[in-house]
């Protein structure tokens, strides 16, 4: 009987323990749910900022930045130097420059005598006497005298061409007559007067040059091929 009572009490105590355990579990479950809901509410009210993703840095971004300051400084220096240097400023073009005639130059040119062409090689008056002859063409005679720009003059014997050979600088040749004084003074090496035919061949000629004693020599060929020499003191 006692054993039965003890067994019954044990069953009751076991049942009571189970019931209290279930009750505790039931009570703890809503508490956990309540705590979880409170945590979610707090997170909703205070959302944590998302951590931004780190982007990979490219080589271009790592490259050193250009130095615009130096370029700007160089530009400012160039601008300053161009402002300080008046020579760098463009000068207004002188439209009249180079177009106005040089009056002084024209007067000087008009005053200068027309000089004969410079000889390419020296021909002595005696060589002229040997190489000039009746019948030579005008071109051939001018080749001997090395002068293609003679002066056309009117003499007492008609129209002639005067060839001045090796004229001293500043000397002004005479018009139609031979300049004997200039020949004596050595201002002119020789002065040749040639009379041409209508066919431009030598008809007759005269050569005036200086002799060794300082006098003037006249050599002439009147068209017969025989030259004559006269001294002029």
Image: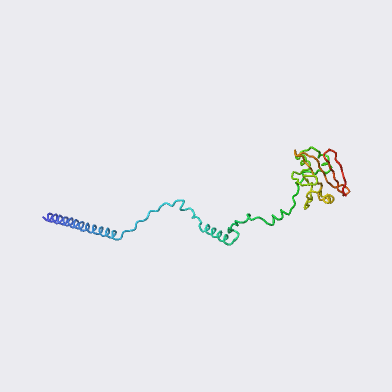
Pinpoint residue 203: horizontal percent, then vertical percent. Answer: 79, 39
Residue furthest out toward the right: 213
Pinpoint residue 195: horizontal percent, then vertical percent. Answer: 78, 42
Residue furthest out toward the left: 1
Q: In this view, does 80 lie to the left or right of 204?
A: left
- Is 133 in front, or is 127? 133
Pinpoint residue 138: horizontal percent, then vertical percent. Answer: 76, 40
Q: In this view, does 189 lie above or below 36?
A: above
- Is 190 in front, or is 162? 162
- Image quadrant holding the N terminus, namely bottom left
Image quadrant assignment for residue 104: bottom right
Residue furthest out toward the bottom: 84
Pinpoint residue 217: horizontal percent, then vertical percent. Answer: 86, 46
Q: Is residue 45 left or right of residue 222?
A: left
Q: In this view, does 187 lie above or below 129?
A: below
- Is 190 in front, or is 219? 219
- Is 21 in front, or is 92? 92
The color scheme shown is: rainbow
Instruction: Report how many numbered discs are placed on residues in the image.
Output: 0
Q: In this view, does 38 lie to the left or right of 7?
A: right
């Amino acid at each position: 009987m006692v054993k039965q009572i003890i067994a019954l009490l044990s069953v009751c105590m076991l049942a009571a323990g189970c019931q209290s355990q279930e009750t505790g579990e039931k009570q703890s479950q809503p508490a956990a749910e309540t705590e979880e809901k409170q945590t979610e509410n707090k997170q909703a009210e205070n959302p944590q900022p998302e951590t931004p993703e780190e982007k990979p840095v490219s080589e271009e971004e790592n490259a050193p930045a250009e130095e615009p300051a130096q370029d700007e400084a160089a530009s400012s220096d160039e601008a300053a130097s161009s402002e300080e240097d008046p020579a760098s400023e463009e000068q207004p073009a002188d439209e009249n420059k180079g177009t106005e005639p040089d009056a002084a130059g024209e007067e000087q040119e008009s005053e200068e005598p027309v000089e004969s062409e410079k000889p390419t090689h020296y021909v002595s008056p005696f060589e002229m006497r040997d190489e000039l002859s009746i019948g030579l063409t005008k071109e051939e005679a001018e080749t001997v005298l090395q002068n293609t720009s003679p002066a056309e003059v009117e003499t007492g014997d008609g129209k002639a061409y005067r060839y001045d050979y090796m004229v001293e600088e500043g000397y002004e040749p005479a018009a139609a007559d031979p300049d004997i004084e200039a020949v004596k003074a050595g201002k002119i090496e020789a002065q040749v007067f040639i009379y041409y035919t209508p066919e431009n061949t030598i008809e007759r000629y005269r050569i005036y040059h200086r002799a060794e004693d300082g006098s003037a020599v006249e050599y002439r060929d009147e068209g017969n091929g025989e030259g004559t020499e006269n001294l002029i003191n």
